[in-house]
Image: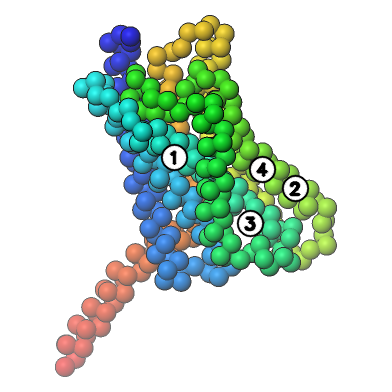
């Protein structure tokens, strides 16, 4: 049994997380819709379309995962207030789905880095620079992640209902389950990103001055973007340290902190919110879309004022 103070602290954690996740959900939804509008009305340069499509995938995954975190927060708050149970098969399914979506979020960054690897090191291979490929890639990856998750998570009985948190997730006391999920969801995408970054860095240094200035500048820009993405993903991993420390303490002492899961998910909510904003400044194509929005919103009132002045002069002249 958890005491009243612990229950109050858990309620506060869930409430603050709900605020962060709600903000993230709204921001990611708005940005996703703006990206889709620009893609639909051909306001994006042809050479930038794949990058913008990959950005749309990232924000769609952020929106889906933050929506799932909102559902978890709401269940925790209702459970704290009314001691309501949400134990069901749907709860278990949503827990598995949340893990898959988190893995997919990291894979979207890998897709971004992979495309820039192709543009720099294998630019002569047109098959890997097709827009259709990068539209279909997330579908293939989600099927692969789902298959891996079912093969790994179910035998280890990872997904359980937590009566003190009122939602289903991986039990942090199940050490084999935590390690396997961390490997699939976190470490594999991070290692892929690190490998791509190292490969591109070595390739650019080996090229020396053999490339033209325009190609060289584009390669350096792509390398800088991948470095930013790698830093962002590294920060996301670092924000998971509080939960990792509590797991280590459990292994040493054998005592589980009653708010272990909520403390672990709290930095995730912060990272999702920061990620939705940081990407706007990290990817030039995405930044340009929003700069163009500001220009359009500034130019339109000026045009209307000029048209009004012309009409007034016409009326006075007549």
Q: Are marks 2 and 4 in contact (CB under 8 Å)?
A: no
Q: Nearer the viewer, mark 1 or mark 2?
A: 1
User: Please, what secondary structure does the residue beneath circle 4 have?
Assistant: helix
**Which is nearer the N-term, disc 4 or disc 3?**
3
Q: Mark 3 to mark 2: distance in Å?
A: 13 Å
Residue 199: numbered disc: 2
Q: Residue at x 30, y 22 (%)?
A: 11
**Which is nearer the N-term, disc 1 or disc 2?**
1
Residue 97: numbered disc: 1
User: Left or right: 243 with respect to 219?
Assistant: left
For disc 3, the marked residue is 115
Q: Residue at x 30, y 8 (%)?
A: 3
Considering depth in this image, is 301 or 40 the residue closer to the camera?
Answer: 40
Where does the N terminus fall, quadrant-wise? Answer: top left
Q: Mark 3 to mark 1: distance in Å?
A: 26 Å
| Mark 3 neighbour density, 10 Å: few (under 14) some (14–19) many (20 or more) | many
């Amino acid at each position: 049994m958890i005491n009243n103070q612990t229950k109050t602290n858990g309620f506060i954690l869930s409430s603050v997380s709900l605020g962060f996740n709600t903000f993230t959900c709204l921001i990611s939804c708005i940005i996703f819709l703006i990206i889709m509008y620009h893609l639909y009305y051909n306001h994006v340069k042809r050479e930038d379309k794949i990058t913008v499509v990959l950005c749309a995938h990232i924000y769609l995954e952020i929106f889906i995962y933050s929506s799932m975190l909102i559902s978890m927060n709401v269940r925790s708050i209702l459970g704290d207030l009314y001691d309501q149970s949400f134990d069901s098969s749907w709860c278990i399914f949503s827990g598995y789905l949340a893990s898959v979506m988190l893995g997919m979020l990291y894979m979207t960054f890998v897709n971004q880095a992979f495309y820039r690897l192709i543009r720099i090191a294998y630019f002569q291979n047109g098959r890997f620079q097709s827009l259709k490929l990068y539209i279909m890639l997330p579908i293939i990856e989600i099927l692969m992640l789902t298959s891996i998750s079912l093969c790994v998570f179910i035998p280890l009985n990872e997904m359980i209902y937590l009566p003190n948190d009122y939602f289903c997730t991986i039990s942090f006391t199940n050490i084999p389950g935590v390690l396997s999920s961390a490997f699939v969801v976190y470490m594999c995408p991070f290692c892929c990103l690190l490998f791509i970054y190292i490969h591109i860095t070595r390739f650019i240094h080996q090229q020396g001055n053999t490339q033209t200035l325009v190609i060289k500048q584009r390669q350096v820009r792509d390398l800088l973007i991948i470095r930013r993405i790698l830093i962002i993903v590294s920060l996301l991993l670092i924000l998971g340290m509080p939960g990792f420390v509590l797991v280590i303490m459990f292994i040493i002492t054998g005592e589980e902190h009653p708010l272990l899961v909520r403390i672990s998910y709290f930095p995730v909510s912060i990272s999702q919110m920061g990620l939705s904003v940081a990407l706007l400044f990290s990817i030039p194509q995405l930044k340009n879309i929003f700069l163009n929005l500001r220009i359009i919103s500034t130019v339109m009132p000026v045009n209307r004022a000029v048209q009004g002045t012309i009409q007034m002069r016409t009326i006075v002249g007549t």
